[in-house]
Image: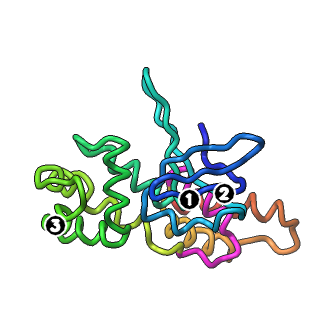
Amino acid sequence: MFNSIQGTITEKLSDTLRLLSGGIEWDIAVPATDIAQFPPVGDKGQVFTWLYHKDDQMRLFGFSDTARRTTFLELLKVEGIGPKGALKIMGGIGQEELENALETEDIARLEGVPGLGKKTAQKMILTLKGKLSHVSRADPITSPYKELVEALAEMGYDKRAAAEALTKAAADLSPGISKAEQEKQLFKQAILYLS
């Protein structure tokens, strides 16, 4: 539905961001750890969003980048964690620390997150171990094919694998073709490498 909203940041609270875009001021629930990642009040910013909709309520959740949103969505897969709980967990522990706690099965660290008990911590480890470790790694793409990598990632391919496939495909490019034709060839060839 909404991927992101761009506009002027009008207010930053501990777990809420307000952003003015197209004459509408959006009230967006944001993890406390993400608030500092947004530009100062008065500056333009972009918020990656997820809309929660139930019979009796709608709430827009926002994140500083797509990796944080992915973490949020993964947390929702854990039995007993809803959107508010996921936001609270993300606000109580940083991305890297969360990933490390899950990978090392550090229940004590997870229990230290406000509102997170031992049973839920155990469920998180069972559900998410090995699934978040790739999420926050710095974007490994320093190639000129970043847009193509993003397009392949949206199709479900791993970004690293997509970047490698594009590099291989670039070696086979026909010389003297237009940039648009180059991109087409690269994209098709990368998909073949990835398949």
Write down the residue under mark 1: 12
Q: Residue at x 49, y 46 (%)?
A: 61
Answer yes or no: do the residues labelled 2 and 1 have beta carbons within 8 Å? yes
Answer yes or no: do the residues labelled 1 and 3 have beta carbons within 8 Å? no
**Mark 2 crowdedness (10 Å alpha carbons): few <14, some 14-19, many ≥20:** many
Measure the C-alpha gap from mark 2 to mark 1.
8 Å
- What number is the disc on residue 9? 2
Please name whichever residue, 92 or 130, is drawn nearer the observer in this view of the structure. 92
Please name whichever residue, 116 or 191, is drawn nearer the observer in this view of the structure. 116
Is 88 placed left or right of 25 in the picture?
Answer: left
Answer yes or no: do the residues labelled 3 and 2 have beta carbons within 8 Å? no
Q: Residue at x 11, y 50 (%)?
A: 119
Q: Residue at x 48, y 48 (%)?
A: 29
Q: Nearer the viewer, mark 1 or mark 3?
A: 1
Residue 37 picture location, percent across and down: 54, 68
Measure the C-alpha gap from mark 1 to mark 3.
34 Å
**Mark 1 crowdedness (10 Å alpha carbons): few <14, some 14-19, many ≥20:** some
Give the SS element for disc 1.
Answer: strand
Give the magenta range: 140-156
Give the SS element for disc 2.
Answer: strand
Is 116 placed left or right of 195 in the picture?
Answer: left
The stretch drawn in magenta includes residue 38:
no
Q: Amino acid at mark 1?
A: Lys
Q: Quadrant of residue 193?
A: bottom right
Residue 189 picture location, percent across and down: 64, 61
Write down the residue under mark 3: 105
